[in-house]
Image: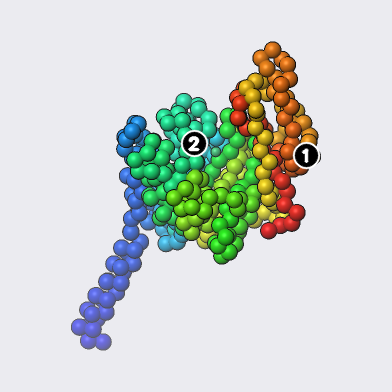
Amino acid sequence: MPRTAHVLLAALVASSLSLAASAQQSTFSVGTATADRGQKATGFIDVPAGVDPGTQIPVVIVRGAKPGALLALVSGAHGTEYASIIALQELITSLDPTQMSGTVVLLPLVNIASFEQKVPHVNPVDNKSMNRFYPGKEDGTQTERASYLITKQVVDRCDYLIDFHGGDLDESLRSYAYWVVTGNAKQDAFSKQMALAFGLDHIIISDDRPKDLSATKYLDNTAAMRGKPTITVEAGYAGTVETDDVAALVQGTRSVMRLLKMLPGTPHSIDHPVWIKALGEVTSPTDGIFYPLVKRDTYVEAGRKLGDVTDYFGKVIFEARAPVSGIVLHICAVPSMKKGDNIANIGVIAPKAP
Ligand SMILES: [Zn+2]
């Protein structure tokens, strides 16, 4: 081969190598975190001050060595649902980008004020739940501004999303997943595979969430209505960080990553889970002191007494009873009871698998 051809071929090889190299090194950023392929990076989504103070939401990018799906993992919208927050900490440490395809974006603690001040259910800055105001508002209160930025920077850019929750400080909860059903058959079939791959053995069929894109309220629903197969998972309860709960969330995430071809191997999908078709919610009509009579994960018949609420002199003023037959998914874990507070959620078992 003449030398000139050698040079030409060498130039071609060099240019294709440099193309491959630039694809290998293509960076991905969320907020102030920027990761190259095969790298892990940390930073913050900066929520500027508005009608109330600003905040910073921690973000971690684990950018796999090879291209692939973009999976978002979000926890700590309720900053005292600790098992889910600790599970994401474990994933931040253990996910190895050099062994991964695709990219995982983790928001391990959306609601820092709740976590720091040990305030359940809401962001104490504006007293709003950080899982009820999606897709958010650029000029709203802190919760709304944070939700707006999470929608733009994470939800809109991901391919799949898992939202992590659990029993809050006052909730004794058995673990379960939500399968978010949108009506798009292809998407719903895939998110069902995600719910099964996650491996929790009770799955709520969540098909009654808002379809209005400007008022999707929940993070999972916001992602699902934007075309991203999504599940929500719940494990842990009442301020505890049990090894089994954390392990279930970590292993479940890894199994979904196998389904998405982000990790080698096959997912360990749950066989014949209990499908929950509806929830019976019991709330207290009065302030008082709560005395539970059943534990989480008990099967109760409709009418079964779940507990008593007394006044501050010990007189029973409300008998809480199961409105439907089903499984006690969670029950109030503390004596404090306020008018309108949740006492228990009963999961009604679907007659057949969807
Ligand atoms: Zn929660």
The percent position of residue 291, horizontal first and vertical second, equals 71, 23
Q: In the image, what residue type sits under mark 1? A: Ala
Foreground residue, 58 or 21?
A: 58
Instruction: Tell me what residue is drawn at x 35 percent, y 61 percent.
Output: 24
Q: CA distance from mark 1 to mark 2?
A: 30 Å
Q: Identify the residue under disc 1.
A: 302
Is 158 left or right of 300, judged from the image as shown?
left
The percent position of residue 174, horizontal first and vertical second, equals 67, 39
Q: In the image, what residue type sits under mark 2? A: Ser
Instruction: Name the mark nearer the viewer: 1 or 2.
Output: 1
User: Quadrant of residue 37 in the image?
Assistant: bottom left
Q: Secondary structure at mark 2?
A: loop
The percent position of residue 58, horizontal first and vertical second, equals 40, 40
What mark, if any, has residue 244 been given in the picture?
A: none
Instruction: Tell me what residue is drawn at x 64 percent, y 45 percent.
Output: 176
Mark 2 residue CB less than 8 A from any atom of ligand 1: no
Q: Residue furthest bottom?
A: 1
Is 328 left or right of 165, judged from the image as shown?
right
Q: Where's the N terminus, which quadrant?
A: bottom left
Foreground residue, 65 or 219?
A: 219
Instruction: Please say whether residue 161 is visible from this viewpoint.
Output: no
Foreground residue, 229 or 6?
A: 229
Instruction: Please say whether residue 217 is visible from this viewpoint.
Output: yes
Q: Identify the residue under disc 2.
A: 129
Is 240 left or right of 134, judged from the image as shown?
right
Placement of 204 over or under 301, stated as above or below: below
Counting residues from the start of the chain, the first of labels 1 and 2 encountered is: 2
Q: Residue furthest top?
A: 313
